[in-house]
Image (spheres, grey):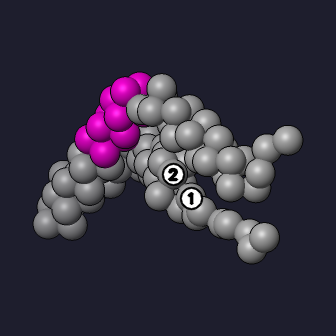
């Protein structure tokens, strides 16, 4: 029978190997999401300094880009939560 320590080690290895296998695709997804977020933020800054009809058109484009921005923020938040940074090693006293 496995000891508690062995079970903790096996679970840790499993968690990190699952995370590493998807890390390349996750990295590409995060880079794309961060690029979308940056473009949205730059557009928002541009809208803030625009005047007249250009301002109206800019805010219309910003509204159209809002769904992509929200999706990108969700991707980054989800992958940040799944990256193992919040993983804690808990050991028991025997």
User: 81 above or below 33?
Assistant: below
- Disc 2 is placed on an element classified as loop
Magenta segment main secondary structure: helix
Image x and y of residue 51, in percent? 15, 63
Which numbered disc covers residue 87?
Answer: 1
Work out which residue is located at the far right of the displayed protein and give it.
1
- Mark 2 = which residue? 84
**Is residue 74 visible to us here?**
no
- For marks 2 and 1, give the CA distance: 5 Å
Work out which residue is located at the far bottom of the displayed protein and give it.
93
Name the quarter where the N terminus is drawn.
top right
- Disc 1 is placed on an element classified as loop
The quadrant holding residue 25 is top left
**Residue at horizontal 45%, vertical 33%?**
20
Which class describes the residues within 10 Å of circle 1: few (<14), some (14-19), or many (20+)?
Answer: few
- In-front residue for pair 86/36: 86
**Is residue 40 visible to us here?**
yes
């Amino acid at each position: 029978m496995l000891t508690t320590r062995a079970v903790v080690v096996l679970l840790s290895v499993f968690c990190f190997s699952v995370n590493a296998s998807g890390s390349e695709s996750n990295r590409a997804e995060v880079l794309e999401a961060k690029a979308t977020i940056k473009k949205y933020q730059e557009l928002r800054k541009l809208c803030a300094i625009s005047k007249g009809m250009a301002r109206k058109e800019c805010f219309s484009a910003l509204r159209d880009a809002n769904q992509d921005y929200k999706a990108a923020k969700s991707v980054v938040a989800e992958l940040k939560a799944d990256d193992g940074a919040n993983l804690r090693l808990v050991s028991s006293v025997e």
